[in-house]
Amino acid sequence: MGIYKDVIITYLIPNYKESIATIISPLIQLPLSNDFIKSFKENKSSVEISQLPFSKECIDFVNGPVCLLSEYTAESILGNGSYGIVMQAHDIDGKIVAIKESGKENVSTLQREAIIMRLCNHPNIVKFLNYTVAQDSFAFRLNAPNLKLDFPRAFLIMELCDGGDLDTFLSNYAAQHHDYLPIDLVSNLFKQIAASQHYLHFEKGFIHRDIKLENFLLVKHEPYPIVKIADFGFGRAIADIMATFKGTPLFTSPQIIRKQPYTSKTDLYSIGVCLYRLATCQYPFSTTKKEFYSQMKERKEVEFPLRFREDSRYTELIDLVKKLMCYDEDKRISWEDFYKHPYMSHI
């Protein structure tokens, strides 16, 4: 059943029929239950579809094992993620973990993130540990600022990455060394970013929709830190053609900014922004809101500082960034050609 089972699982709850119907065409060729496919053709109700063996299997996966919140003790607040407050905690065995907590209105969003993470098993993706919904709040106990306390609340338990996020790492390096990252470090960090996206795209059929350096967490390691992507709150299936505005403007494709339909290539654009920022410690366009949107409207092309254009070591990197950040999605480099690019073969 491959990636399509993963896609179905992420959409099965709570809108069984409406969600799966958008991806039913490619399922026709797969060895799924004939009853499962037939139910859509016959316009069966969501309740009837949910009772099918394949649906039940997926629902059991979504529900997951029992998780007792009492097994965890929150220690400190680490920061805010998409739709949640992230805290450091430990379990009854003393193992240090990270917990993301969200309020009532974002329970389904955090559940979708938990499902996507649970489906993944890759060294460059933050490891899922558990998920639950409860009438409780760790954030309240830790006096989280501006907390909207509503119930029930959702809790995503995952591995703790002890090196902070990649954007902070980059900023701290630039401030301490008054220079750019060494090119070998840029290449190693980007290679790990690319590996995570290859797995999500080709093996799991997911599009992240909020790729930015802040969403890549680091695990301390020598000689290079280990990079792990997190924050799957905006995650969707590649099978969708989307039109909703998701993501962070400075890393977001022109199609999302202009509220146009977009595909998985929107993540390629964001990956290009990440590579540009890793190499130059800057953003490709203005960080001032008015000027940024003006540059997007003018279809301004990305340009590298002279130092990089004159350094032959960056020639392939610059070429790749320009292909990734092509304004028109249909002219943007494909996922397949991205991984075949000369820069990728040399890192």
Image: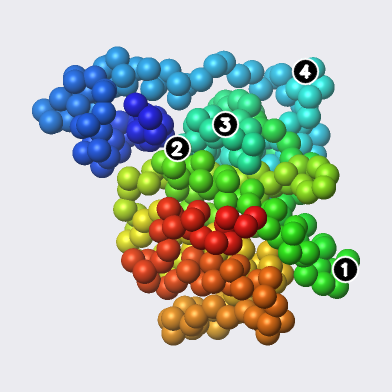
**C-alpha span from label 1 to label 4:** 41 Å
The local secondary structure at tag 1 comes to helix
Q: Which residue is mark 3?
A: 121
Which residue type does callout 2 highlight? Answer: Lys
**C-alpha span from label 3 to label 2:** 10 Å
Residue 17 is situated, as x and y percent measured from the top left of the image, at 25, 33
Q: Which residue is mark 1?
A: 177
Which residue type does callout 3 highlight? Answer: Asn
Q: Is residue 176 above or below residue 56?
A: below
**C-alpha span from label 2 to label 4:** 33 Å
Residue 251 is situated, as x and y percent measured from the top left of the image, at 55, 64
What residue is rendered at 25% in x and 33% in y? 27
Q: Is residue 18 above or below residue 290?
A: above
- Tell me the crowding category of disc 1: few under 14, some 14 to 19, or many 20 or more residues within 10 angstroms, Cα based: few
Which residue type does callout 4 highlight? Answer: Ile
Assign the C terminus to one quadrant of the image.
Answer: bottom right
The reply, left or right, for residue 237 in relation to residue 178 is: left
**C-alpha span from label 2 to label 1:** 39 Å
The local secondary structure at tag 3 comes to loop
Q: Which residue is mark 4?
A: 92
The reply, left or right, for residue 275 in relation to residue 180 is: left
- Residue nearest the observer in this picture, 203 or 244: 203
The local secondary structure at tag 4 comes to loop
Q: Which residue is mark 2?
A: 204
Report the mark closest to the observer, 2 or 4. Answer: 2
